[in-house]
Amino acid sequence: MSRPFRIGQIVPSSNTTMETEIPAMLRAREAAFSERFTFHSSRMRMMHVVKEELAAMDAQSLRCAAELADARVDVIGYACLVAIMAMGLGYHRTSEGNLAGIATQEGGPAPVVTSAGALVKTLEELGFRRIAVLAPYMKPLTCTVTDYIAAEGFTVQSVHSLEISDNLAVGRRDPFAAIEAAGALDLAGADALVLSACVQMPAAAAIEAAQQRFGLPVVTASSCTVRQMLKALDLPPIVPGYGAALSA
């Protein structure tokens, strides 16, 4: 491809992280590979991470897919893990199919990656069956997330919920605060640590430090999303410095 790959994202209106972490990871990749990327977003209204707002937000995703199709992006990422998981077990497959259908209908066909689907696909590909999970959500929504992951065939052996409902507050966290919060998890026997099961909670910059501290593979929802985006573009899913999901 002579032009840069166009990365499209469907983003909650209060999300301030995915439009920084995704470009940061792909800019890091540009230092090691020849491909170049540009970034394009469409937004869905959502301020508080509660089930009612998540459902209302998800209903806007089809409009966003149509808008990104207008830009002829090469891949579309749905940047809200919990919104997908709150819609029912296995819903990432339905969402990905619906969004891809809209993009094709609007003349801009593109593969679709949801952050929810990216997390479970990456765990499967890397053979991580027993995981520990750090999430910012209120406990009922965290249970929704862990139930969803368990239904995909994984064992969530330990989980820690920070109980922050304000999505803007989640996005303001220091990425390295996730390492300290993960200290509350029981990691004995875990195959991997999900340092952030939320694409709004910054943690990508802390992945390598977390791997060194805890001595096991570390992924985040955002690093898994980048992995699956690269695979959808038929590119090697490698980004130096961003942990297990993007390791050679």
Image (cartoon, rainbow, N blue to C red):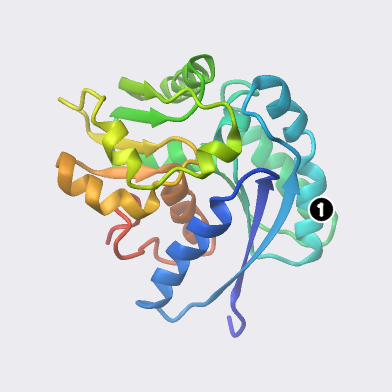
Tell me: 200 left or right of 218: right
Residue ID for mark 1: 66
Quadrant hosting residue 80: top right
| Viewer-proximal residue among 219 and 50 | 50
Image mark count: 1
Q: Element at badge 1?
A: helix
Q: Position of residue 96 (x, y in %)?
A: 65, 42
Quadrant where the image shows the C terminus? bottom left
Name the residue located 52 percent from the left edge and 18 percent from the top edge: 144
Name the residue located 59 percent from the left edge and 40 percent from the top edge: 168
Figure check: 224 above or below 25: above
Q: Amino acid at mark 1?
A: Ala
Can residue 149 be seen at all in this image of the molecule?
yes
| Viewer-proximal residue among 211 and 46 | 46
Quadrant where the image shows the N terminus? bottom right
Tell me: 203 left or right of 109: left
| Viewer-proximal residue among 138 and 92 | 138
Quadrant hosting residue 197: top left
Quadrant hosting residue 51: top right
Q: Residues within 10 Å of mark 1 (few under 14, many from 20)?
A: many
Q: Position of residue 134 (x, y in %)?
A: 37, 30
Can residue 128 be seen at all in this image of the molecule?
no
Q: Position of residue 94 (x, y in %)?
A: 67, 33
Figure check: 71 above or below 152: below
Q: Position of residue 36 (x, y in %)?
A: 52, 77
Name the residue located 36 percent from the left edge and 55 percent from the top edge: 205
